[in-house]
Amino acid sequence: MKQLIKIVCGISCAVLLVGCDSRIDAVNQEMANIRNQQPLPIEPAPVFNPVPSFNYSAQQLRSPFLPNSLANELKVMSGKQVYPNFSRQPQPLESYPLESLTLKGSMKGTVGQTVGLIKTPDGEVERVQRGNYMGMNQGRIIEITPTRIDLLEIVPDGRDGYIERPRSLVLIGPID
């Protein structure tokens, strides 16, 4: 029995060694054949027809990539240097976008100054007066009327600078 197992193992090892023929010689022969072939010719570069030059005559007109309102603001603000005051302590209404704040009304203060009533998205009503700030773009209140609050925001102009942009909150609908 042991003799049979030795014979079977010997035959299987011989078969395995014969099946492990190296293919490196075949690859080397194929590479030598490829190197001995004539190289393929390189195709010439395509001929391009010259494109006629175009003279752009609308250089002095408004840029088509800026909205009309921003282009007008940039024209007005072209000589004025405006920068936001990041060292100023932010006021409570500056944590809300201006679009989310609602003008709920106005009233006369003790000194005869008009005070605006602003409703926040949280449902709270805040008092504001001229000189206060609101909105996320450092909007300074410049005027309060019974139906409107006017402010100036400081926004980037797209050219590493800032401009002042007028905005308004308007009283809409009945007072709650």
Image (cartoon, helix red, strand yellow):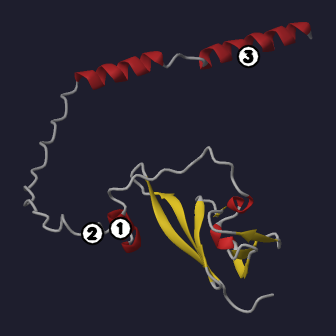
Residue 67: x %, y % from top left: 39, 71
Residue type highlighted by circle 2: Arg
Of the two numbered discs 2 and 3 in the rendering, the one whose residue sits closer to the viewer: 2
Q: Which mark identifies residue 71? A: 1
Tally the numbered discs: 3
Residue 45: x %, y % from top left: 13, 44
Residues at marks 1 and 2, CA–CA distance in whole angstroms: 7 Å
Q: Which mark identifies residue 126? A: none
The residue nearer to you, when weighing 127 against 73, is 127
Left or right relative to 154: residue 92: right
The residue nearer to you, when weighing 81 against 64, is 81
Residues at marks 1 and 3, CA–CA distance in whole angstroms: 87 Å
Which residue is label 2 attached to?
A: 62
Q: Report the residue that reaches farthest toward the front.
A: 111
Which residue is label 3 attached to?
A: 12
Q: Do the residues labelled 1 and 2 touch (CB within 8 Å)?
A: yes
Residue type highlighted by circle 1: Ala
Q: Earlier in the sequence, mark 2 or mark 3?
A: 3
Which residue is located at x 53 percent, y 66 percent?
Answer: 152
Q: Residues within 10 Å of mark 1 (few under 14, many from 20)?
A: some
Residue 23: x %, y % from top left: 49, 20
Left or right relative to 41: residue 120: right
Image quadrant holding the C terminus, namely bottom right
- Does residue 110 sit above or below 84 in this rendering? below
The residue nearer to you, when weighing 16 against 69, is 69
Q: Report the residue that reaches farthest toward the right.
A: 1
Residue 1: x %, y % from top left: 92, 11
Residue type highlighted by circle 3: Ser
Q: Earlier in the sequence, mark 1 or mark 3?
A: 3
